[in-house]
Amino acid sequence: MTSTKAPSGEVVLEAVGLTKHFPVRRRLRQIFRKEHEAVHAVDDVNLTLRRGQVVALVGESGSGKSTVARLLAQLYPRTDGDIRLHGVSTRVKGGRPFREYAARVQMIFQDPFASLNPVHTIRYHLTRALKIHGNAENLDAALHDLLTRVSLTPPERYLDKFPHELSGGQRQRVAIARALGARPEALLADEPVSMLDVSIRLGVLNLLRDLKERLNLAILYITHDIASARYFADQTLVMYAGRMVEGGDSETVTQTPAHPYTKLLIDSAPDPDRLIADIDPLEEDRGNGEPPSLIRPPSGCRFHPRCPSAMPRCSTDLPVPLQIGDTPGHWAACWLYDSPEVAS
Ligand SMILES: Nc1ncnc2c1ncn2[C@@H]1O[C@H](COP(=O)(O)OP(=O)(O)O)[C@@H](O)[C@H]1O
Ligand SMILES: [Mg+2]
């Protein structure tokens, strides 16, 4: 793979002011009695993926993480903002331009069973990925190589199996192998281990880390489990109700969180000693269905109605990212840090 020779740290993919508003469905329009309302799923998101680095995007369910991944994968058109591949603004809509984009930016989904076709063998899935991306010259060796890379060895044992004959972890390894068949530069992994048994999650994360290093991949790791972000990611970004609220290197964000929401995420993790948590800690907190807060998001800071430290300005002024302490790159969008003497 020639592309692995790119320098580590090279910027592959950037989101700049990325925004997605989904039109509200008719049933909900009746409830809210307004036309042209929208779910403000993602607002003004900035992130940068670099070769050889993992960026974690953390937040409770419904915060807009999958939408960010799907926008970056060009599966949805964006409402506003930009997506830059190697610095070049990119918008593709299917066909050959999409295939060319997907050859460089691949997604891995949460549910490996849903993403593999039950009537086809592993050989079929991987062959197809290799062919679509023009990497099928010397097919047998390429298939062998893909399965070996994801530690499904010996490959002959897996090639002619069907998805249901594999365990969840093995299926996710096949989904990863299929993504590698495109020889991508970036992987967008949307909760890649949250449907797997707790006991095998670490193995799959370690595989992704190994691939990051060997293939010099840029990885976006989406999770609701901030403890796994600390373990696995170089940088961590925290998202709440469609907006980024904190970011920095993973150690700093998880050990000395600044934003009250990040603190809440860490404090409500069910067991701080367990690296890979099993549940979404804040899921029970929320009502069912479409969160109304994203149709009419709270003014000012979206977290202010739940924030134990909210001040009057938090309900009116949208917080801007503020540098935290003297750790380079650590920021939080929180008015608590607007004047140094108030911050603690
Ligand atoms: N295709 C869609 N149409 C309308 N609303 C959507 C769509 N996809 C996601 N949403 C809404 O956008 C918000 C963010 O969803 P999502 O990105 O899936 O969050 P997460 O992955 O963090 O759980 C949610 O309120 C969700 O209901
Ligand atoms: Mg999601």
Image (tube, rainbow, N blue to C red):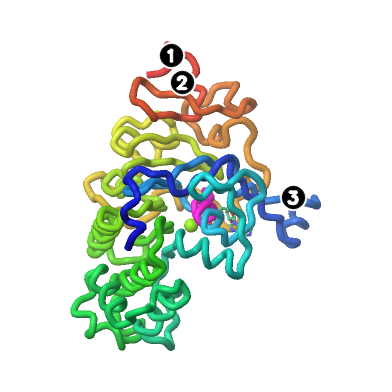
Cβ at disc 1 under 8 Å from ligand 1: no
Quadrant of the drawing holding the C terminus: top left
Secondary structure mostly seen in magenta is helix
Residue designated by label 3: 37
Residue 252, by quadrant, is: top left
Residue designated by label 2: 337
Q: Are marks 1 and 2 in contact (CB under 8 Å)?
A: yes
- In 3D space, how far apart are the residues under numbered discs 1 and 2 (Cα atoms)? 6 Å
Q: Nearer the viewer, residue 320 or 86?
A: 86
Amino acid carrying mark 3 in the image: Glu
Q: Mark on residue 340?
A: 1
Determine the residue positioned at 50% across, 55% down.
Answer: 69
Q: Which residues are magenta?
A: 63-69
Residue 277 lies, with reference to residue 339, above or below; the image says below
Mark before the other along the chain sequence, 3 or 2: 3
Amino acid carrying mark 1 in the image: Pro
Helix, strand or loop at label 3? It is loop
Disc 2 crowd rating (10 Å Cα; few below 14, some 14-19, many 20+) is many
